[in-house]
Image (cartoon, helix red, strand yellow):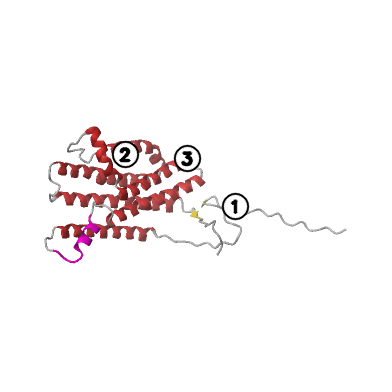
């Protein structure tokens, strides 16, 4: 009697516990690594921010020149800081969206690790998604009239949207205290510094601008200076936050990678 050899038992391959996304399909899929140099990335964002701010200053100077010149009506509004639907607004929205994406990736990694704070990482991502949309849609400016109907108009609350947003900021700070204590000291410190600078620019200087407008000094020399400082603080603080997230990914989640597969649709 001959004995048939028993085929070796095969264990199905499972995705790495550090993999974010779905398991690999049975078909052969080639990995496409995308290297990300943190220093080069942050340098590019800083240069982009400086260029946008510089063009905004040029736009402000050009708007005060009485002599007409070619493409003036196109250049001035396109690069004006504090305006809607132009390049500085789109760039700010891009920075906020980038921060949202990085926080989302960290949240996915934390979910794979069954981390207790995974939902707060997702909340961070959601906050930046909202800020990115708000930067383009100007939701906060549209809320001003509604808030004024409740609290009235005054110098401090001329831009009345800062009142409900201030309440939200306080609530977020209270909610995130345990989260910040859980993080490494440098990460938590960087986040708090970036958040403080952003609130200072977006809300603190906005209050001063509202006081100037309320007192009839909207076209004073101080207004464009304040607007430039406001936009610089907002963009710079988000770049700082992005650097903090990238550094956290490199130092504490270096084994995590993202597998992305496209499914559905008909074959050509």
For mark 2, give the secondary structure. Answer: helix
Task: Please name whichever residue, 108 or 177, is drawn nearer the observer in this view of the structure.
Answer: 108
* Label annotation for residue 51: none
Q: Which residue bears the numbered disc 3?
A: 116
* Residue at 16% from the left image edge and 65% from the top image edge: 69
* Residue at 28% from the left image edge and 57% from the top image edge: 87
Tell me whether circle 3 and circle 2 mark residues in contact (CB < 8 Å).
no
In the image, taking residue 234 as reference, residue 265 lies left or right, namely right
User: Is 214 drawn above or below residue 22 in the view shown?
Assistant: above
> Is residue 103 magenta-colored?
no
Task: Please name whichever residue, 90 or 237, is drawn nearer the observer in this view of the structure.
Answer: 90
Magenta-highlighted residues:
68-80
In the image, taking residue 69 as reference, residue 169 lies left or right, namely right
Label 2 packing within 10 angstroms: few (<14), some (14-19), many (20+): some
Task: Please name whichever residue, 5 or 137, is drawn nearer the observer in this view of the structure.
Answer: 137
For mark 1, give the secondary structure. Answer: loop
Q: CA distance from mark 2 to mark 1?
A: 42 Å
Q: Quadrant of residue 61?
A: bottom left
Q: Is residue 184 visible?
A: no
Q: Which residue bears the numbered disc 2?
A: 169
């Amino acid at each position: 009697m001959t004995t048939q050899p028993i085929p070796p038992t095969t264990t199905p391959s499972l995705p790495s516990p550090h993999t974010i996304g779905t398991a690999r399909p049975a078909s052969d899929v080639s990995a496409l690594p995308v290297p990300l140099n943190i220093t080069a990335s942050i340098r590019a964002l800083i240069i982009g921010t400086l260029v946008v701010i510089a063009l905004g200053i040029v736009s402000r100077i050009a708007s005060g020149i009485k002599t007409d010149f070619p493409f003036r009506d196109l250049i001035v509004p396109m690069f004006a800081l504090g305006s809607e639907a132009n390049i500085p607004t789109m760039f700010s929205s891009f920075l906020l969206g980038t921060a949202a994406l990085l926080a989302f990736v960290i949240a996915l990694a934390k979910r794979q690790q069954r981390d207790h704070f995974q939902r707060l990482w997702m909340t961070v991502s959601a906050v930046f998604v909202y800020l990115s949309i708000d930067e383009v849609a100007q939701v906060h400016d549209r809320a001003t009239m509604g808030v004024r109907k409740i609290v009235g108009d005054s110098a401090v609350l001329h831009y009345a949207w800062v009142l409900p947003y201030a309440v939200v900021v306080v609530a977020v700070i209270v909610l995130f205290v345990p989260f910040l204590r859980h993080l490494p000291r440098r990460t938590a410190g960087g986040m708090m510094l970036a958040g403080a600078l952003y609130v200072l620019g977006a809300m603190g200087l906005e209050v001063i601008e509202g006081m100037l407008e309320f007192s009839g000094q909207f076209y004073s020399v101080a207004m464009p200076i304040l607007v430039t400082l406001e936009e610089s603080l907002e963009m710079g603080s988000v770049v700082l936050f992005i650097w903090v997230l990238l550094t956290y990914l490199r130092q504490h989640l270096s084994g995590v990678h993202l597998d992305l597969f496209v499914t559905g649709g008909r074959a050509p």
